[in-house]
Image (tube, coloured by chain):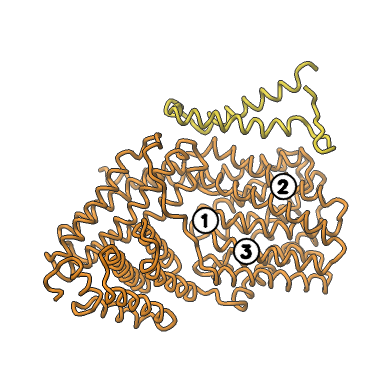
Chain colours: A orange, B yellow
Amino acid sequence: MTTAVLPWKQWVRRTALDWLFVVRTLAGALLALAIALRLDLSSPGSAAVTVAIIALPQTGMVLEKSFYRFLGTLLGAIVTLCLVAVLAQHQYAFIAAVAAWIGLCTAASARFPGFRAYGWLLCGYTTALVGVPAFLDANHAFDIAVDRVTIVSVGILSAGIVNAIFNPSRSTASLDTSIRNSVETLVRARDLIGARADTTTVEQQLQRLSLGLVELESARSSGVFEDPVTRIRSRRIRLLVEHLMVARGRLDVLHRQLQRTANDPVATLLSREADEEVQAVLDVYAKIDSLDTSDLRPVFTRATIAVDAVQALVAGTRAALTVLLCTAFWILSEWPDGLLATVFATVGCAVLAATPNPVRAAWQMGIGAALGVLETLVCDLYILPAANDFVTLALALVPFMAVAAWQMTRPALVLQGGSCLLIFLMCSNLTGVMHYDVVAILNSGVAALAGQLVAMVSLAVIGPSDPAWRARRIMRRLLGTLRLARSGELEHLRTRFHHEVQDLTTQLIAVRATNTQSAQDEKLASNVMEIGDAIIRLRHEPGSPELERCLDDVVAAAKAEDTRAFASLETRLAALREPGAPVLRLALQALGDPRAA
Amino acid sequence: MPRELSLFGIYVPTLLAAFPVATVVYLLLDGVLARVGAYRWVWHIDLFRVALFALIFGMLGLLCYSGY
């Protein structure tokens, strides 16, 4: 009987959570709108737009995103004021400086993980959003900048308070679940390997652990914003993640060794090491709830860097060129909504470049924008004129916002719903004294769509951005970790090495849309992990000149390979592991295996 | 206390200055409460924290508007 009840209960719970999300988003947006109208800010709709942008399922995520949104806006506003102060008389130099700054911020945003990337992005486009009006009216530049920061702050505070009070899903709760799951998965993987379970089962378990670790890290970084207790526990959790990564790597190496030969000295040694590392994980896990941080060692590893310098440079250049092109078209054609199109193109470029399938994402956002314009027309022409105070205004907006917010609860429609809500709140032009102007609505709607179109085109035309290219870049860095293993400083080298390989592997899986490719990626990552692990082990042994040369050969082989096809690398790496291959022979020798002779 | 402060020659409401002060006091208090484990006894932690901040900020606000 219970099996029949459980899915039903789950459905009710999920639906309730979805509708609570809709209610929260609406309440936050209306609260922001009310405050902004009361304070008589220039565009109260933008405060509600902020709420829509930071609407996320968990409290911690909302707070984290708002934190970086605020910082980005503040820094962007300050930079804008400096630019206006210096270049107020030079139109072209000002545009060039704004384009360069946006390019710089986009490049920086590509280098940072999670919501920090978003903060940088925002820092760039705030310059366009504030800078252009401030440039045109330099005497009021300061007021315009303060107005923008106030609008964003009102939105953030409203969303934060509504979320803190009405959101039952906390990042801290999912953090605890994902810690428990990760440790359990690790222990199960160890038991499976110990019981010589078949390869697919073990690999599935190890992959689940990798994905669990990504989830854990994002829950931790959001949870820190949610709750001071999590902030205190954060360092211990990061330590646990470090241990989990090393343990996962060692289990992987052990598993591959056992597949080749069981019961040889190497396997015994690897098995002992893996057990020690799992025990270390369990030791940290035993005290995971403790608030006492005095016994903790420092954390060795840094947070993930999402892409390499080349990719960041490409993203930055693309953003700067897009801004230049858009502003050039805007100035030459004297298009009244050119600024809006520029902003949409810049944001679109950066947001879309990070998605696995940019064209599909652009399509979804385009549909959302079109729906948003349609909603705005209906609402502004037929319903809003009947509203004569805030309550009726809210009643008029709620149905339209609710549809878009509900779409945001569906994973497949997230981008569409978000884009729809954003365009609706922006184009409705909600101010204290309403102006009903169909032409203005259509103009800004067209500008938003045109901006997204430009983003799509510049993604396709300026520099490579396809997933295959990004995957190749990540693979290059994956092979580069062998160089770290070869010549990195020995202190905590194993932890750093496993951390990097782990990071890059999960990034690779995230970039790959298809599953067939991702199995190959896993294999490559395992190869790199195994060879790197062996190299580090050998470096701890007293080295002979022959050994040194051999290690250099391995690294050189990996380095030479990364410019060519990666398929051949697979065979090259396999050859290195053959019993007769120098690396393995030396490894065996170092471990005192008689077969090495 | 005066209702307006002169900040680099610009008059700003004292409440604007009180806000960051309240934030700092709140963060300190929040940290201490977390460290001693007081939040284990709280039902709705976020509501409690919002209320805590409202209390501190309200107190500072009353302080600068008292005597009028």
Question: How far is disc 1 from disc 2 in space, using C-alphas?
Answer: 22 Å
Q: Which residue in the structure is indicated by mark 1? A: A114
Circle 2 SS class? helix
Q: Nearer the viewer, residue A310 or A458?
A: A310
Residue with the mark numbered 2: A149
The picture places residue A44, in percent across and down from the top left corner, at 74, 46
Residue most toward the top? B67
Exactly how many numbered labels are in the figure? 3
Residue at image position (79%, 60%) is: A132
Q: Secondary structure at mark 3?
A: helix
Q: Residues within 10 Å of mark 3 (few under 14, many from 20)?
A: many
Badge 2: chain ID: A
Chain of the residue under label 1: A
Mark closer to the observer (2, 3): 3
Q: Which residue is mark 3?
A: A106
Q: Amino acid at mark 2?
A: Val
Quadrant in the rendering for residue A262: bottom left
Secondary structure under badge 1? helix
Q: Is residue A214 above or below residue A529?
A: above
Q: Where is the N terminus of chain A found, in terms of image quarters? A: top left
Image location (x, y in percent) of residue A539: 30, 65
